[in-house]
Image (cartoon, grey):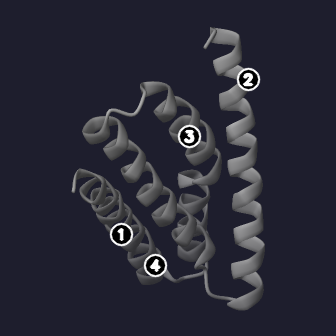
Amino acid sequence: MTSLALLLTVTAAGAVGAVTRVVVESMVGTRWRGVPLAVPLINVSGSAALGVLAGLVLFRGAPDTLTTIVGTGFCGGFTTFSTAMVNAVRLVQDGRTRAALVSVSATAGLSVGACALGMAVTAL
């Protein structure tokens, strides 16, 4: 794959990931109004997907370009660390410091666990 083709493919995958995030946010927001679950759900599921992807490359011989396209492109567009941090700051500003700490800690811990699980599944 040429550099230009790879760049365009990563760009397209990133756009699909971003649109998928918007769809998931709107679906979760509609179902659980007032409970900030969409962004953590997106980040944890994106981490699981990236774990599976990393495992496919490390343990199953998948091409590195798969990581670039799906990992950097789709998962990069889908997941959103910065929005998670904005949500945490807003919780603190609303006087909900404990909720912010739980949200950040749970998202980080669950994301690492989901990534590890994804890698472990592909190593079987």
Q: Can residue 25 be seen in this view?
A: yes
Mark whose residue sits in front, 1 or 4: 1
Above or below, 65 against 19 in this view is above
Above or below, 51 against 11 in this view is below
Mark whose residue sits in front, 1 or 3: 3
The earlier-in-sequence mark between 2 and 3 is 2
Given contact means CB atoms under 8 Å apart, are the residues at marks 2 and 3 in contact? no
Q: On the image, numbered disc 4 is attached to which residue?
A: 97
Mark whose residue sits in front, 1 or 2: 2
At x 29% / y 60%, what residue is drawn? Answer: 121
Q: In which quarter of the image is residue 64?
A: top left
| Residue 5: % across, % down | 70, 16
Q: Distance between the residues labelled 2 and 3?
A: 13 Å
The earlier-in-sequence mark between 1 and 2 is 2
Nearer to the camera, 95 or 40: 40
| Residue 83: % across, % down | 62, 58
The earlier-in-sequence mark between 1 and 4 is 4
Q: On the image, numbered disc 2 is attached to which residue?
A: 8
Q: On the image, numbered disc 3 is attached to which residue?
A: 70
The earlier-in-sequence mark between 3 and 4 is 3
Q: Is residue 76 left or right of residue 63?
A: right
The local secondary structure at tag 2 comes to helix
At x 75% / y 42%, what residue is drawn? Answer: 15
| Residue 28: % across, % down | 69, 80
| Residue 93: % across, % down | 59, 73
Nearer to the camera, 36 or 14: 14
Q: Is residue 53 left or right of residue 85?
A: left
Q: Residue 110 carries which label?
A: 1
Given contact means CB atoms under 8 Å apart, are the residues at marks 3 and 4 in contact? no
